[in-house]
Structures are given as structure tokens and as C-alpha cells.
Image: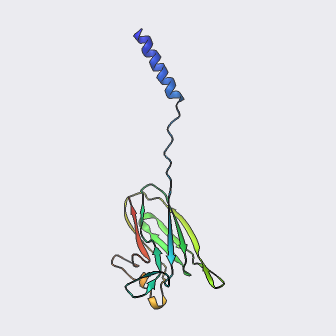
Amino acid sequence: MRKVLLMAGVCALGALAYTLPAAAAPVVTPEHLTVYILPGRQGLPAPNGHRNDSYVPSSFVLKKGVPAVIRVINYDDGLHSMYAPGLGVNTIMMPGKHVGATLQPTTTTFTVTPTKTGLFRWQCTIPCDGGINEHWAMSAGFDGHSQVGYMAGFFVVR
């Protein structure tokens, strides 16, 4: 009798396992970030005594393995870039467009999916922030080309 019950139990478990759907792979929801490029007259004040071209915000926290959709809105009339070789980021942001007396911002969207954790510095590689600012935002900072908080920053990947 035990053999019959054991066999019936094994068959029932086999049938149950056969009818259950396989577990689906987890769906990874992308992170969405919005960044603004502000021209010198609207940018952040700096130690040089002037307002300077600025990315706001300039540093970001990302998650390893999670796509980050980054939307950059450029209110400046000049080209800008975001270059972070450690993450494979090398994107150009087109300048805003003059429409009559106003400047219409342009939007550039790109996606990065970090594959490793760490601190990754990015910088704008296109000369900007001229005039009375004398390209201060592009000058060498304590940790490399361009001033962090203006035309450079960090991706923190956790």
C-alpha cells in the first residue's frame, strides 16, 4: 500500500510541476534622469566671480545592471558633451536653437547600463564658457580636465 501511495504522490508532483509555468526573468525597470545645461548667464556662480556654463545636476547615482535613461536639455547656444570612458558614455548635446529673440532648448536622450560598481568621472570635451569667463568651467580642476560641478561630474554606480 505504501508503494502505491508513494507512486501516486510522485505522479501528482510530476503533473503539478509540468503544469506550472516557468518563472519569468525579472523585469528591470530603467531609471530616468533629467539633466539641464545652463548657459553662463544662468549657470552656477563660481570662484572666478562669474556665472559659468553648468550641468545641473552634475553627479548621478546609478545602479549596476539597471539601464539609466538620461535626458539632457541644453539651454545654451553651444555644443556640449558628456564623456565617461569608464562607462562607455560619449554623447554630444546639440545647441539650443534661436527662434526669433528666444533660444529654444534641445533635448538629447541616451541610455547607459553600468556593468560594474565604482566612481566614474565624466567631463564635457567641447570648449565652452568663453567671454568674460575665459573658459573657467573648462579649466583643469583638482582631479582632471573641466571643473566638477560645472562641466564635469561623477557617476556613482552601486
Residue nearest the observer in this picture, 46 or 68: 46
Rendered-image quadrant of the N terminus: top left
In the figure, is residue 14 to the left or right of 145? right
Rendered-image quadrant of the C terminus: bottom left
Q: Is residue 1 visible?
A: yes
Give the percent coordinates (x, y) of residue 13.
47, 23
Identity of the residue drawn at 39% across and 66% down: 120
Residue nearest the observer in this picture, 149 or 102: 102
Q: Is residue 124 visible?
A: no
Colouring method of the image: rainbow
Q: Residue furthest top?
A: 1
How many marks are shown on the rendered structure?
0
Compared to residue 143, the image places residue 101 above or below, namely: below
Identity of the residue drawn at 55% across and 66% down: 109
Q: Residue furthest bottom?
A: 132
Which image quadrant for residue 146? bottom left
Identity of the residue drawn at 49% across and 28% down: 17
Compared to residue 155, the image places residue 95 above or below, namely: below
Compared to residue 55, the image places residue 130 above or below, namely: below
Identity of the residue drawn at 34% across and 75% down: 143
Q: Residue furthest left?
A: 142
Give the percent coordinates (x, y) of residue 31.
49, 58
Give the percent coordinates (x, y) of residue 114.
44, 59
Which image quadrant for residue 79? bottom right
Give the percent coordinates (x, y) of residue 7.
45, 15
